[in-house]
Each structure stands twice: as structure tokens, then as C-alpha cells.
Image (cartoon, rainbow, N blue to C red):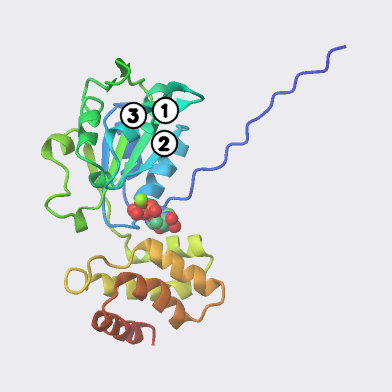
Amino acid sequence: MKPALHAVEAVVPPPPYYAPAGHECALFEQAWKRRVPLLVKGPTGCGKTRFVAHMAAKLGLPLFTVSCHDDLTAADLTGRYLLKGGETVWVDGPLTRAVRQGGICYLDEVVEARKDVAVVLHPLADDRRVLPLERTGEELAAPPHFMLVVSYNPGYQSLLKTLKPSTRQRFAAIEFGFLPHDQEVAVVAAESGLSPERVAPLVTLATRLRKLKGHDLEEGVSTRLLVYCASLIAEGLPLRDAVLAAMIEPLTDDADVKAALIEVANAVIG
Ligand SMILES: Nc1ncnc2c1ncn2[C@@H]1O[C@H](COP(=O)(O)OP(=O)(O)O)[C@@H](O)[C@H]1O
Ligand SMILES: [Mg+2]
């Protein structure tokens, strides 16, 4: 007798924890359904990447993440011919894999990439939804469950590094900021395991330090740094050392600015 067939249930991990600030999850889902590409902008460490990872998992879509940098070219995204055992074979880049397979292609810090990247994104990010592969002569049509998501930080962009209107007007955009106090406390507590009572003064300090942005600081304390700080405290590092290591040193190399930040910290956390 043949053994009975058992249905094997795939164990799907829950989506990574994400605390919404507003209606961004619904907006993402609507954009996905209507095939509208999305631009997520906001300061570093405010939850952009976590949001995209959360939504990809929630919608059950594979996620292809590319962290863009100033050497990233269109060929890095689309693919190239490589020598393999004496033969040249075409190897898809992450964007091409995402278009062939369907899912979310997330280009993090897209303004960092080389200019030629815009050329491959344009026909993909408008109603054509195609990816021309010049080298292979193919023109791939994106399947319905393909979505392009890009993020960037408008805060520290120079004039040279900003998205051209022809690119940005191909995306619906959401602006991210830091969460309101109580919500940020909840997120940092959940991420670090430190109690909300002990996290609260750290968030108060972060809010004070964020107000200095633009004067002496290029960027304020991110939620990411708050999570680091709280995690170090939860691990036993004394409060002041953790604040110095995770909320002050990462912000500046300037001795005067650092002294000013320490003064603010002393006033807030005592
Ligand atoms: N809304 C949020 N929900 C859950 N975690 C968050 C949220 N915002 C920030 N975080 C925490 O901050 C960290 C940094 O967020 P991330 O998404 O990597 O920032 P970004 O991509 O904007 O630079 C995350 O790893 C997570 O611990
Ligand atoms: Mg990110």
C-alpha cells in the first residue's frame, strides 16, 4: 500500500515588525494593485527599508533589494556577460531577475547610482513596463506582480545628487519622518527589549538632538541609532556610555560639536 500523502505546510515567517506612522501600508498596497511605482523618501534610519520588507512579506512577494552606491551602473542592475569555463554566458542582474520572476525590486538610495541607471528605470517605471536589455537584444515585459520601489534621503543631497523631474514624476511618493514620541518609544522598546520607561528619555534626547540638524549637524539621531543605544543598555552598558557610543559619536567628528551634544545629553538624561 502506498503511504498516505501528507500536505506539507510551508512555514511562512511573519512579516518583519513594522509600526505604521499613518496610512502608508494601504497606499503601498493600492500602488501595488494598480502597478504604480513608489518613491519612499526620508532621513536615514527612519524605517524606509523596514517598511518595504514588511510590505513585501505581507503581500507574499519576493524582494530584490539593491543598495545603490556611486559606482553602481545600469549593467549592475540589468546583468552582463561573464566568462564561465571558457564560455561567455549572460548573467541577469537583480533588476532583470525581479522583472523575469515578478516581485518587488527595491533600489535603496537610488540617487547615489550612476546616471545611466535612470535610462533603464524610465521604460519600466511608466506605462510601458518594459526592461530593454540592449546587450541581449531582449525586451522584457514586467509581469503584473512586478513593482518598482526606490528610496532616497532628500536631506543630504547635493544639487548634483537629486532625482531629475523626468525620473521622479514616474513615481508616486511617500515622505517618511521620525515617528511621534510615544510611537517611537514603542518601536525602540520592541526592537531592543529595553523597557518603554527606560527608552522614553532616549527618545526625548533624540528629539532634542534632531532640532540641531542643519546648524551643527548634517543628520539627526535616527531611529536606528536609538535602537542601537537601547540595545547596548539592555546588554548592560551604562546609560551615559551607550548614549555617547550610539547617539553622539556617530553624528560628528568635530570636538566642539561633540561637546555641545554632550551638554544637551547631560541636560536631558542627567
Ligand atoms: N516604523 C518602524 N517600525 C519598526 N521598526 C522601525 C520603524 N522605524 C524604524 N525602525 C527601526 O529602525 C531601524 C532602521 O530602519 P531602516 O528601515 O533600516 O531605515 P532606513 O531604510 O530609513 O534608513 C530598523 O532596523 C528598525 O529597527
Ligand atoms: Mg534603508
Going by the numbered disc 1, the residue's amino acid type is: Leu
Which is closer to the viewer, label 1 or label 3?
1
Residue shown at 37% from the left, 25% from the top:
99
Residue 152 image offset from top left, x and y in percent: 26, 48
Q: Residues within 10 Å of mark 3 (few under 14, many from 20)?
A: many
Query: Which numbered tag is attached to residue 82?
Result: 1
Residue shown at 35% from the left, 21% from the top:
144
Side of 80 relative to 155 (left or right): right
- Residue 138 in view, yes or no: yes
Going by the numbered disc 2, the residue's amino acid type is: Phe
Mark 1, ligand 2, within 8 Å: the answer is: no
Which is closer to the viewer, label 2 or label 1?
1
| Element type at mark 3 | helix
Q: Residues within 10 Å of mark 1 (few under 14, many from 20)?
A: few
Residue under pointer 2: 64
Image vertical order of residue 56 relative to residue 184, above or below:
above
Residue shown at 52% from the left, 78% from the top:
237
Q: In the image as oriented, which residue stretches furthest toward the top?
A: 1
Query: Which callout, 2 or 1, points at the residue further toward the start of the chain?
Result: 2
- Total marks drawn? 3
Whether the residues at callouts 2 and 1 have beta carbons within 8 Å, the answer is no
Residue under pointer 3: 78
Residue 216 image offset from top left, x and y in percent: 20, 74
| Element type at mark 1 | strand
Q: Quadrant of residue 46?
A: bottom left
Going by the numbered disc 3, the residue's amino acid type is: Thr
Position of the N terminus, as image quadrant, is top right
Mark 2, ligand 2, within 8 Å: the answer is: no
